[in-house]
């Protein structure tokens, strides 16, 4: 695929994604070319590159402190009831995405088209949840192209209504932050960076900010939730990770600086990407010229769908792939290249721009969670592995019992004002 890149670089989107992405006006979906190169440069320089990520380090650290503080409070208030991991992690990730993208943890915003102010929960519902649900909405015409001339009004109305609501909310958020920036009230953000790029249209600006919001708030949650599910389900592996953290950090709080010295943590992360692929089916690629792939003649006009789930469960490439086993990535039994065989972040020029942030947040969160608590699944949840949505969300949110390990935690929290 990488070698034949120029022949298969175009994405052919189903109708819903075409509408929601404003005909590929995004880094992740756009076809390789001048626009893609420009917007990827912007997102790497303004938010996701190593230099930009260093600027958001304090915000991520406070996010971790905030989650641990919430967990401790919930456990203290009701030690016998399982807590909903997804709700806590989702709220903090969305807060982080708003701060990085817009410069503020937005509590509410007035939307002119709605004629009222909407809450943060409504912002999340409209900009993230509704978009994910529309993305998996099925238009039967995608499977029968020769019948594409037949109207599917119910589907079209749902998708276009959701898209127009998303646009109204994003425009309101951007307008509100522009006023804060003009008054010198906003902290540095991705929006601030993009406003200095005169080549962007208003539509492109809006879509790039929205992409930063939804991607930070979605796939990282999926991977971390699955990882904590597996660790809670496998206490011996959780104990091994805890001991590694103890050996490296002692009584010191684990931070991002410790991550390079935690190989088993890294193995847990990559094994989760393999076993629970966040995006099990890559959006179809469109072959725009005759080419050869794996010995096959592939004619122009062919659509290719990469089945990452199938690749990561292939017994020719993985020993006992049906088992979640982080040890496959440690103990000297693997090559460094094995960690990239999962293809979770793609490869080559189209590799995921957010891989550094996703890896950092997920690994730092897992380390902090295991350092402070022993995790145990709610009784009966051991085999709840069904998935739903465009990314492979757990169908049933992770509910766990936490037992504090007796560490003192920081009281720092993200400024929510």
Image (tube, rainbow, N blue to C red):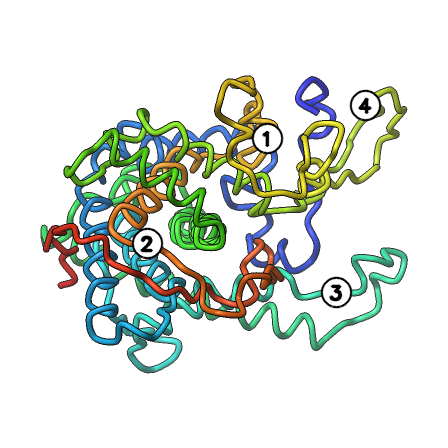
Q: Say which label, 3 or 2, has the lower sequence index.
A: 3
Q: Indicate the position of residue 364 as horizontal and vertical percent values.
A: 31, 41
Question: What residue appears at the point 61 percent right and 35 percent down from the top-left corner?
Answer: 31
Q: Are marks 3 and 4 in contact (CB under 8 Å)?
A: no
Question: What residue appears at the point 35 percent right and 45 percent down from the top-left corner?
Answer: 366
Provide the residue designation for mark 4.
Answer: 293
| Front tag of 3 and 2 | 2
Q: Secondary structure at mark 2?
A: strand
Distance between the alpha carbons at the discs numbered 3 and 2: 45 Å
Q: Are marks 3 and 2 in contact (CB under 8 Å)?
A: no
Q: Say which label, 1 or 2, has the lower sequence index.
A: 1
Pointer 2 local density, CA inside 10 Å: few below 14, some 14–19, many at least 20: some
Pointer 1 local density, CA inside 10 Å: few below 14, some 14–19, many at least 20: some
Provide the residue designation for mark 2.
Answer: 374
Q: Say which label, 4 or 1, has the lower sequence index.
A: 1
Tag shown at residue 139: 3
Q: Say which label, 2 or 4, has the lower sequence index.
A: 4
Tag shown at residue 414: none
Q: Indicate the position of residue 58 as horizontal and vertical percent values.
A: 17, 42
Distance between the alpha carbons at the discs numbered 1 and 2: 45 Å
Is 141 or 250 nearer to us in this picture? 250
Distance between the alpha carbons at the discs numbered 2 and 4: 48 Å
| Front tag of 1 and 2 | 2
Q: Say which label, 3 or 1, has the lower sequence index.
A: 1
Q: Hey, which quadrant is residue 312 in on the image?
A: top right
- Residue 409 as seen in the image, left or right of residue 345: left
Is 263 located above or below residue 79 in the figure?
above
Question: What residue appears at the point 56 percent right and 58 percent down from the top-left corner?
Answer: 20
Q: Are marks 1 and 2 in contact (CB under 8 Å)?
A: no
Q: Say which label, 3 or 4, has the lower sequence index.
A: 3
Provide the residue designation for mark 1.
Answer: 32
Q: Are marks 3 and 1 in contact (CB under 8 Å)?
A: no
């Amino acid at each position: 695929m990488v070698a034949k890149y120029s022949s298969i670089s175009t994405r052919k989107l189903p109708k819903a994604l075409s509408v929601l992405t404003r005909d590929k006006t995004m880094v992740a979906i756009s076809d390789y070319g001048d626009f893609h190169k420009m917007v990827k440069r912007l997102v790497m320089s303004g938010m996701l590159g190593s230099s930009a990520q260093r600027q958001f380090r304090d915000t991520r650290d406070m996010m971790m402190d905030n989650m641990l503080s919430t967990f401790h409070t919930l456990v203290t208030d009701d030690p016998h009831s399982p807590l909903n991991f997804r709700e806590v992690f989702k709220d903090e990730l969305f807060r982080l995405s708003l701060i990085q993208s817009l410069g503020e943890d937005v509590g509410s915003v007035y939307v002119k088209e709605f004629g009222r102010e909407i809450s943060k929960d409504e912002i999340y519902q409209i900009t993230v949840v509704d978009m994910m649900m529309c993305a998996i909405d099925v238009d039967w015409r995608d499977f029968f192209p020769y019948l594409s001339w037949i109207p599917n009004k119910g589907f079209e109305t749902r998708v276009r209504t959701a898209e127009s609501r998303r646009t109204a909310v994003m425009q309101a958020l951007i307008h509100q932050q522009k006023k804060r920036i003009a008054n010198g009230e906003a902290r540095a953000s991705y929006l601030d960076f993009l406003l200095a790029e005169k080549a962007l249209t208003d539509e492109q600006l809006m879509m790039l900010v929205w992409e930063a919001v939804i991607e930070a708030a979605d796939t990282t949650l999926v991977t971390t939730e699955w990882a904590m599910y597996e660790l809670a389900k496998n206490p011996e592996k959780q104990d091994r990770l805890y001991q590694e953290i103890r050996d490296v950090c002692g009584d010191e709080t684990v931070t991002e600086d410790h991550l390079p010295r935690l190989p088993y943590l890294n193995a847990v992360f990559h094994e989760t990407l393999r076993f629970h692929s966040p995006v099990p089916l890559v959006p179809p690629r469109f072959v725009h010229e005759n080419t050869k792939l794996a010995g096959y003649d592939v004619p122009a006009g062919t659509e290719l769908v990469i089945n990452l789930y199938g690749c990561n469960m292939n017994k020719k490439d993985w020993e006992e792939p049906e088992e979640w086993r982080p040890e496959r990535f440690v103990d000297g039994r693997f090559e460094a290249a094995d960690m990239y065989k999962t293809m979770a972040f793609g490869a080559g020029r189209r590799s995921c721009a957010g891989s550094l942030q996703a890896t950092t947040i997920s690994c730092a969160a897992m380390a902090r969670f295991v350092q402070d608590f022993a995790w145990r699944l709610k009784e009966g949840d051991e085999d709840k592995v069904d998935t739903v949505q465009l990314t492979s969300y757990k169908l049933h949110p992770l509910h766990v019992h936490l037992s504090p390990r007796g560490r003192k935690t920081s009281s720092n929290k993200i400024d929510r004002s």
